[in-house]
Image (tube, grey):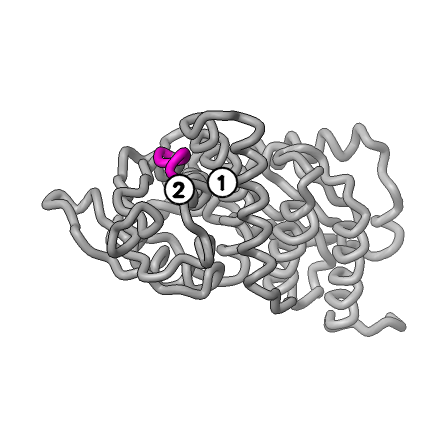
Amino acid sequence: MHLMNSELFTLTYGALVTQLCKDYENDEDVNKQLDKMGYNIGVRLIEDFLARSNVGRCHDFRETADVIAKIAFKMYLGITPSITNWSPGGDEFSLILENNPLVDFVELPDNHSSLIYSNLLCGVLRGALEMVQMAVDVKFVQDTLKGDSVTEIRMKFIRRIEDNLPAGEE
Amino acid sequence: PFCYPDFNAVTCNLLPDEAAAPQRYDGRRALRASLRRLFAIGSQLSPEVGSSGIEMLETDTFKLHCFQTLTGIKFVVLADPRQAGIDSLLRKIYEIYSDFALKNPFYSLEMPIRCELFDQNLKLALEVAEKAGPFGPGS
């Protein structure tokens, strides 16, 4: 396992976003592309996560939240977001990121006010959870890049994905 | 050893030399198809509720080991019945798959794995597992 310089990571992600901005010319399309790329990462990353972390099947969405915040985020981004704002039904929660390695040194210019800079993360989470049979909706509701005090990702459980269940999970 | 994923199954052959001779491609396809059907009904046949399906199939000449991931991928290893260490081999193969297949951006999910690094590392892992078996290199 290599230890990589996080500055290179920040620069790489930044290069990706700015290139997308040049290619697509409007923030909405860039957001969509970031989500799509994130999704493609997520469907692969989940296997690395499962192979390495030895985490078993989560029994409910609360367990899932814990695994995401305390194990997955720690493993891949070196941060542990806090879990807050559970909905009464237990199907929605927020991840509060006090710092976000993707946005070190980044400032959003005025002409990109609708850009969701870290939207890749939403795609990653969505793709990864889909592979373990959970359809979820993931979005940023607060962003330090936009002047908010914290960065908040809202995750909502939509439904269990019933097709292609592993044996024994029916 | 032969290794290929098709419909979420990666199969490796750890049988003693004669049986490990390259099989015709059709034979492997038929094997994969049979395994797929077997596994599909395996968990339903089980008297246990929520059975995860076939984990091991034992015969006089070989043992078939199957490991199923939470994402539904099955790793299948055919080995000599006396061969030990298959559980850790299966987990090692999962790691090798997640590294050399999935982290290769040119590999498309659910396609046959034609990545040299995957083959090389898999071969290494199989060699290590073989050496760890109850019968040494001389037997």
Judged from this view, the residue extending furthest toward the left is A88
State the residue at coordinates (42%, 42%): A117
Dot label at residue A122: 2
Write the start and end of the magenta stretch as one range.
A109-114
Q: Position of residue B130 (x, y in %)?
A: 77, 65
Tag 2, which chain?
A: A
Residue placed most toward the observer, A5 or A111: A111
Q: Is residue A112 magenta?
A: yes
Residue type (three-letter) at the residue carrying disc 1: Gly
- Residue A43 horizontal side relative to residue B111, left or right: left
| Figure check: B44 above or below B19 | above
Tell me if label 1 and label 2 are in contact, CB under 8 Å.
Answer: yes
Q: Amino acid at mark 2?
A: Cys
Output the chain of dot 1. Answer: A
Q: CA distance from mark 1 to mark 2?
A: 7 Å
Residue at (40% x, 63% y) in the render: A71
Secondary structure beneath dot 2 equals helix
Pointer 1: what residue?
A38
Residue A72 in the magenta stretch? The answer is: no
B45 left or right, relative to B128 = left
| Residue A6 relative to residue B20: left or right | left
The one of B31 and A120 positioned closer to us in this rendering: A120
Callout 2 crowding tier (Cα within 10 Å): few <14, some 14–19, many ≥20? many
